[in-house]
Amino acid sequence: MADPTDKMENIINLCKRRGFVFPSSDIYGGFNGFFDYGPLGVELKNNIKQAWWQDFVHRRDDIVGLDSSIIHHPTTWKASGHIENFTDPLVDCKESKMRYRADQLFFAPVRVAGETIGYISVLEDETMSAKAEEMANEMKRKLAKQGALEPLTLKDYTEAKPEEHALIPSPATGKPGSLTPPRSFNMMFQTYVGAMQDASATAYLRPETAQGIFINFKNVVDTGRVKLPFGIAQIGKAFRNEINPRNFIFRSREFEQMEIEYFIAPSADWQTAHQGWIEGCLAWFESIGIPRAKLSLYPHPTEKLAHYSKGTTDIMFEFPFGVQELQGVAARGDFDLTQHSDVSGTKLDWFDEAAKARFIPHVIEPSVGVDRVFLALLTTAYHEDEVEGEKRIVLRLPARVAPFKAAVFPLLKNKPALVERAEALYRRLKKRLNVFYDESGNIGRRYRRQDEIGTPFGITIDFDTIEKDAGVTVRNRDTLEQVRMTEDEVVRFLDEQVNG
Ligand code: ATP
């Protein structure tokens, strides 16, 4: 379990075996960058989205929801800058036909005693420095060079000088000469709308949900429910033709985002608002079971920000394959509303009654991927331990997000009185919550089947339940403690555990 690759393998296996996540189009051999969520996965995913919506929309007074279409008027993407700038640098290996993102392909000249003896290349990951060191030593040994190896300086391929392109080996073949110079690759998926298949009919699958919010700003303001500062929240699919989808559902080509555009007055202190959102998002992650210790902040260096951006901080999570972005919290100024106002000719502004002034609000944008939250929860929850001398896999998912909130078991399946009582409780609970019923196999095995899919409570109907009216036992997945309670108490107990 110590090896992070094993942990990811174990989680991917569990996801397939128990019906959380399948490779898309499995019967046709899968389709790279796409995934299907199975019967348990769709529950976990819906619970994440529901918790987010409850906490950021229903439980607040200043945020309203939206569900815009996935395909917008194509001019949207011209105004937003996506047609020109939503690109990744792509590099091809002409020999192997492999494609890489140039900013994920690292290289270094190998220098021994002042002489460059060749180049090495590695793909970005946690171990790339160690791998590069090993390759450089290997090259020195093969070429029988004497003297000290100089420390390697790894740079990404976008920083390579034109004369270096032919010298850097392809990660696929290990030999130089086959890598192309980097070129810009637009990540938006194109489609045609209507019967014509020409440039006039080109449209795009949205690469983010955010623009749907900006282009509806006026509609939402005109319906009159909001007062500045306020936010518009949206959950929905986004599509990016990622060059290199990887790390399971972490980077895929079709995923789901939960985004808020939070509008503030231009005179408001954006730094305080930005910081408030960062802290609010950290607190939310903790509340759904992602520990603070695995989260960290990455403020983007000012020189790498887009010209309009005032500041962006990523909330990073310690995934088994490294510390990676879970959420971005960006302060985007008035860029988006100004662009859409200018290009559409429709004023997207706010009239401040008190100051009798019109202005374009500024915006703070917390944006998070549902699939990445799903993966962060699974990697946090996944444990292997031992119960009664047997190895068990357990997902320690909090009750609020767990696919099933409880499982109901009659102690024995061949005793009709036990079965009847268990089924009655199951039906009663099922009206309120997603619960599971299982009567097959010994009770220990039934517990373990539920532990593996994260069901927090096991409710057993035994002879004391029916003969002495002594209530049912409720077993806690994590502490293994068993307490007796009446069926009425179980209903209240589960409601509290799930809804707080
Ligand atoms: P990255 O640097 O990882 O490509 P990004 O900075 O391009 O991400 P944003 O455009 O800020 O990402 O998107 C907001 C959020 O959407 C990300 O924090 C992430 O949770 C999610 N997201 C972005 N791209 C993907 C993807 N290809 N697969 C899954 N989730 C994604």
Image: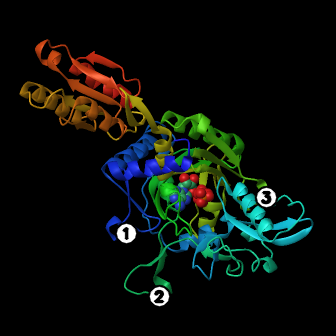
Q: Is residue 88 above or below residue 331?
A: below
Q: Is residue 433 above or below residue 35?
A: above
- The disc labelled 2 sits on which kind of residue? Asp
Instruction: Please tell me how crowded label 1 is: few (under 14), some (14-19), or many (20+) other residues with Cα within 10 Å.
Output: few
Could you tell which of marks 1 and 3 lies nearer the N-terminus?
1
Q: Is residue 478 above or below residue 86?
A: above
How many angstroms separate mark 1 from mark 2 (CA)? Answer: 32 Å
- The disc labelled 1 sits on which kind of residue? Gly
Hey, which quadrant is residue 167 in on the image?
Answer: bottom right
Q: Secondary structure at mark 1?
A: loop
- The disc labelled 3 sits on which kind of residue? Glu
255 or 221: which is nearer to us? 255
**Residue at the spot 75% in from the left edge and 58% down from the top edge:** 133
Instruction: Please tell me whether mark 1 or mark 3 is closer to you in this view.
Output: 1
Instruction: Please tell me how crowded label 2 is: few (under 14), some (14-19), or many (20+) other residues with Cα within 10 Å.
Output: few
Q: Which mark is residue 332?
A: none
Could you tell which of marks 1 and 2 lies nearer the N-terminus?
1
Q: x, y percentage for residue 33?
A: 47, 65
Q: Which mark is residue 198?
A: 2
Instruction: Please tell me how crowded label 3 is: few (under 14), some (14-19), or many (20+) other residues with Cα within 10 Å.
Output: few
**Residue at the spot 73% in from the left edge and 70% down from the top edge:** 158
- Locate the C terminus and report the quarter of the image it occupies: top left
Instruction: Please tell me whether mark 2 or mark 3 is closer to you in this view.
Output: 3
Quarter of image, ligand 1: bottom right
Q: Is residue 129 left or right of residue 219?
A: right
Q: Secondary structure at mark 3?
A: helix
The residue under label 3 is 303
